[in-house]
Image (tube, grey):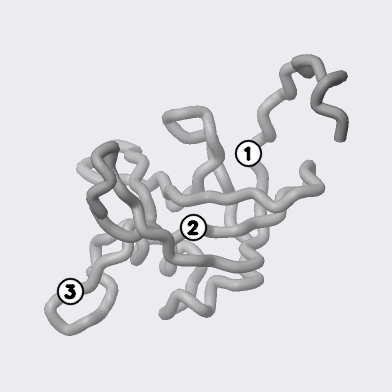
Amino acid sequence: MELENMKIGEEQPPLEAKKVKIVSYKPEEVTNKDGKEVGTKLILNVTHPDSEKELQISAIKFERDSKLKEFGLWVSEDKDGNIPHHSSLAYLLRTCKVGTVPEIVNKEVETVTGDRGYLVVKGY
């Protein structure tokens, strides 16, 4: 790659919301602007039918309080050490029709365009 000869490329159209396949996942520590750890998010590595590269999705949109809302896939546990029943991660598992995180691999999920213009899992 010759950086000296590179120019700004043309804007690429955003990927359409389509069904994607979850190929892997990883928990990722999230820090704020000050470098303080604020929690752990689950990052989904997915394949999209219109992209040669894997994409990462870290949010889900579902209905709460009679409105569609978008939530990050934050990892937390309840008092028994399980995924909290009403958490975004629990919604992901129910959307995939599985009971544990490892079971989401190779599952297909629908996506929608999220509040920031990125694809998120459709959980409704």
Query: Mark 3 = which residue?
Result: 78
The residue type indicated by label 1 comes to Ala
Direction front: furthest residue: 4
Q: Closer to the observer: label 3 or label 2? A: 2
Depth check: 113 or 34 in front? 34
Q: Earlier in the sequence, mark 3 or mark 2?
A: 2
Crowd around label 3: few <14 · some 14–19 · many ≥20 (10 Å): few
The residue type indicated by label 2 comes to Ile
Q: Closer to the observer: label 1 or label 2? A: 2
Depth check: 82 or 28 in front? 28
User: Could you tell me which residue is drawn at 23 percent across and 72 percent down?
Assistant: 77
Q: CA distance from mark 3 to mark 2?
A: 20 Å
Name the mark on residue 17.
1
Crowd around label 2: few <14 · some 14–19 · many ≥20 (10 Å): some
**x%, y% of residue 59?**
43, 48
User: Could you tell me which residue is drawn at 49 percent across and 72 percent down?
Assistant: 97
Report the side of 70 relative to 23 (left or right).
left
**x%, y% of residue 90?**
34, 66
User: Could you tell me which residue is drawn at 45 percent across and 75 percent down?
Assistant: 101
Report the side of 67 relative to 93 (left or right).
left
Q: Quadrant of residue 68?
A: top left
Q: CA distance from mark 1 to mark 2?
A: 18 Å
Q: Earlier in the sequence, mark 3 or mark 1?
A: 1
**x%, y% of residue 107?**
62, 68
Name the mark on residue 43.
2
Q: Secondary structure at mark 1?
A: loop
The residue type indicated by label 3 comes to Asp
Report the side of 48 relative to 99 (left or right).
right
Q: Secondary structure at mark 3?
A: loop
Q: Are marks 1 and 2 in contact (CB under 8 Å)?
A: no
Task: Give above or below for 22 relative to 38.
Answer: below
